[in-house]
Image (cartoon, rainbow, N blue to C red):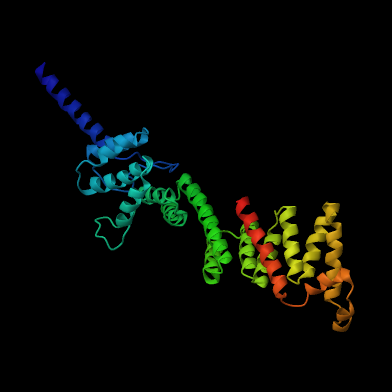
Amino acid sequence: MRGRIRPLALAAAAVAAVLARCASVPPPDQPSGAFPLDPRLELEGPFDDAVSRGWRALAAGDPRTAAHAFAEPTQGASARAAAIGGVEALVLVGRPEEAVERCASMLDPDVPNPNPNPTTPLLTACGEAYARTGQPARAYELYARAAAHAPKMPRVEARSEELREAAVSRMLDEAAKDAAAGRRDAARAATARALAWAPRSASLLVRAGDVACALGDREEALADYREALAAGGLDADTQARIGEVALEAGDPGMAVSIFERLSAEDPLFRDRAAEARLAFRIANWPDAERQASRARRLTWLTSTIRGWPSRSFQRSWSSRCSVSLVTSRSAT
């Protein structure tokens, strides 16, 4: 009887050892990629029990318990996983500033690191830390790296897109502030970066045009507006505003195209379409005839087509662009 019990005991011990080992390795996959991720992903174990307990607490929605577990002394791959889990826990307990401080050193290429390649869990954890401290551009950069690193995690890709949109919106907000303050180079740089980061959607191009408009760069503004109109999807009010800017900037042809299209759908725009057509005809008159047309009704229209506006007109132009910027920001 004892001879039978001994082999059974040994088999039970072996099974227990296998189960214990399995508890210390991450699940085979996490297809969604929703934050937080198992900090052991992409690292080679075995891992200490503290890391396993920390992840179980994170997955159960208990980041405070997880933080205590990850803070226990560990070595090797366990220490790296615990450090990543510690960042995730800090973010989830509402201390993203501390998480950012840790991320700064963990992602610093000049800091010696036994595994210098950032894992997907580290990139997403730090991305969330930066996002929750109001730094969407840095957050997007990290999430974009994570998405490229783990293409089979759709939630990582989706979060990357969310952060990209937030970053682009922030850049255009800053560009608008710089334009209003006369910081031309900064405004142009922020707009260029926003356009480089995002697909050239109609709404984005309108906001870029508004910044150029506020800077007095009428050709650049009209170019952005034309591309926005070609992309489609702009509401009637936005199209009408672009038409007004085009008319004031001395491009009555563009204004005619806009107001003719709008008037075909809404009779309220018929008078403005007629004024745009008249401005277009005057713009194509010989100089002598244009100089002779001094009728009161034509005085303002004639001033809009004689090259760069006067100072008083420039003030009107800037005022319209300021309204455009406010409108664009409130719509995003």
The percent coordinates of residue 301 (x first, y second) are 82, 70
Work out which residue is located at the far front of the displayed protein and give it.
312
Work out which residue is located at the far top of the displayed protein and give it.
1
The percent coordinates of residue 323 (x first, y second) are 66, 59
Residue 289 sits in quarter: bottom right
Q: Quadrant of the N terminus?
A: top left
- Relative side of 3 to 160, left or right: left
- Relative side of 310 to 23, left or right: right
The percent coordinates of residue 200 (x first, y second) are 61, 60
Residue 260 versus residue 102 in the image, above or below: below
Front residue of 45/10: it is 45
- Relative side of 7 to 257, left or right: left
Work out which residue is located at the far left of the displayed protein and give it.
2
| Residue 206 in sight in this render | no
Residue 207 sits in quarter: bottom right
- Relative side of 245 to 173, left or right: right
Residue 46 versus residue 230 in the image, above or below: above
| Residue 100 in sight in this render | yes
Residue 308 versus residue 135 in the image, above or below: below
The residue at the point 65 percent across, 58 percent down is: 202
Front residue of 276/261: it is 276
The residue at the point 73 percent across, 70 percent down is: 249
Residue 113 sits in quarter: bottom left
The percent coordinates of residue 3 (x first, y second) are 10, 20
Q: How many labels does the image show?
A: 0
